[in-house]
Image (spheres, rainbow, N blue to C red):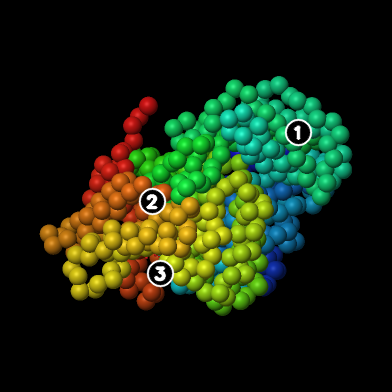
Amino acid sequence: MNFPLWDKRKTSSLNGVWQFKFSESGDFDNDDIARIIYDDIINVPGAFDASPAYNGKRGIGFYRTTFTVESGYAAKLLFGAVGMYCKVFVDGAKVGENYAAYTPFECKIPPSVDAQRELVVMVCNRFDYERNPLQEPYFDFYAYGGIFRDVELQQLPDGALIEWVGVHAIDYKTGELCVIINSKSGVQTLTTAFDGGTEQLFPNCEFKDGRYTLNLKLKNFQPWSPEHPELHTLTVANGTDAMTVRFGVRQVATQKGKIVLNGKPVKLLGYCRHEGHLQFGPALPLAQLIGDLQMLRDLGCNFVRGAHYQQDPRFLSLCDELGFLMFEETLSWQAQPNNFADPKFVAAQLKQAEAMIYSSYNNPCVIIHGFLNEGRSELEEARECYMALIKLFRELDPHRLITYASCSEYNDKFLEHIDIVSFNIYPGWYAHDRNDERPLGEIVPKINVLLKGMIEHGLDDKPFLLSEIGAGAIYGWRDPVCAHWSEEYQQEYLRIVCQEVVDNDAIAGVAIWHFCDIRTYRGAYALNRPRCINDKGTVDEFRRPKLAYNTVKTIFGGYKHK
Ligand code: ADA
């Protein structure tokens, strides 16, 4: 079941078949949606440009459906994710817009005398930096268009709404919790209940600036951990509205170069994972989300880095249930000085980061928050943006570790401000020595140079994470000379990486690049991406295991069924 639940709102899913019109030349500024003639149907959620009829097309997809809300009631539409950007219209009037492809957003719908309402979403997948500074054509993953994730309708009760509830553990041993509730300012009476049990009453709760904080104590629990992913629910009600969230009691910290979960060091063994599939784009069916985690579990992983954007909330929910640890990050790829100098870019980064913090606040699986993958963090021009993001994460969610995946090594200017030093490195793949026919010997020395650097730069109290490392292999390409792109080369490569990570105490973890093959550039940027696919998956785009699969599994230890 997906959380949160709003027990007093009439909710319904708007997923399903919608009317559709695709326009290659459509004008995103033209709000006259009454003129649209819908000549097709499409699935929601889904990426229209991953569907056979509109594969690879860029333009505007007009989506139309109807819904009902009792006459006189206000409502809310909750969109899980719409890429690349969109405008939302109800009964012909604009009720919202969104310019961050993987970020959830909501639109408030005013009451009407008519129960039947019309919903149109204008979805554009054209690169347009002015509107959408978060996605650019040079990114190494395909930018899809469509309503990617669930759409939910909520009919709202009259009165003060409970907008958000966040729970975090003050003490994972005693079960002391801090509960933050966002609602209307003023005095309210609240009730709370753990796991659907006895209610506790809290009269005279004074909400200031729309927020009230309660300290509660959960009894009879065990801390959440990969070995024991125990989850609980908390229902907060105010007479008018009620919200149920699911959480786990756990604490994450760093200590002497280790990541520490509930007081014990944990080594992170896992993969970076784009949410992608050739047939579905980023809108994966539940069976695929579960299938991906079954494979990761089978490999012996306990860790996923969600690259390079917020992953499906259903995926996070499954990670909570199965006990995976997550590095969650916002959408960005190799941001440049022109981006950092642009207030529009910085504002968009902060906005999506804030939305990510609120939406996954209660997922115990998320232990690390990240941002700006491979931004130019070696440049002074990047400082303002990095520092603003670090400040935001520290203020809104001080209970998680923060990092960013850097490719600047020790030229990086901001490592001292984050909790984990995370480096993306590709020794032996984008090899230093291009004459070497088998540059696998570069891998371990490179890791050791970086580890030495941690001491030299006074960073050795921080954990060291290999946030990316990997090699490409084309599925089925076997080669007796074990050349680049062969399954054999990737197998050898990952054997060395995984063994080093497991054996070397100074490495806090690895997120191998990458779990599955994924679609990327179509233009000439793809000249080192055979098939226009990033082939560094340990499984291919249809999740068929390559040779390296069993090697990683043997070293990581595989999964032992309980
Ligand atoms: C980078 C980047 C990834 C991917 C990878 C690669 O480190 O962060 O998104 O592009 O390189 O495959 O080369």
Please tell me whether mark 1 sits on a helix, a strand or a loop.
strand
Residue 291 sits in quarter: top left
Residue type beneath disc 1: Ala
In the figure, residue 133 lies in which quadrant?
bottom right
Indicate which disc, 2 or 1, sits on the residue closer to the N terminus. Answer: 1
The 10 Å Cα crowd at callout 3, few under 14, some 14 to 19, many 20 or more, is: many
Count the marks: how many? 3
Query: In the visual, does 240 lie left or right of 148?
Result: right
Report the front residue among 98 and 374: 374
Percent position of residue 317, x then y: 53, 40
Label 1 CB, ligand 1: below 8 Å?
no
Q: Earlier in the sequence, mark 3 or mark 1?
A: 1
248 displayed left or right of 307: right
Neighbours of disc 1 within 10 Å: few (<14), some (14-19), many (20+): many
Per the image, the residue denoted by label 3 is 521
Residue 167 seen in this snapshot: yes
Tag 2 or tag 3, which sits nearer the N-term?
2
Helix, strand or loop at mark 3: loop
**Cα separation between marks 3 and 1:** 48 Å
Q: Nearer the viewer, mark 2 or mark 1?
A: 2
Q: Amino acid at mark 2?
A: Ile
Residue drawn at 67 percent across, 42 percent down: 166
Residue 237, numbered label: 1
Secondary structure under tag 2 reads loop
Residue occupied by mark 2: 507
Residue 510 appears at what percent x and percent y? 39, 51
Q: Is residue 156 visible?
A: no
Q: Residue at x 44, y 67 (%)?
A: 410
Quadrant for ligand 1 reads: bottom left
Q: Amino acid at mark 3?
A: Tyr
Decide if ligand 1 comes within 8 Å of the CB at mark 3: no
Dot in front, 3 or 2: 2
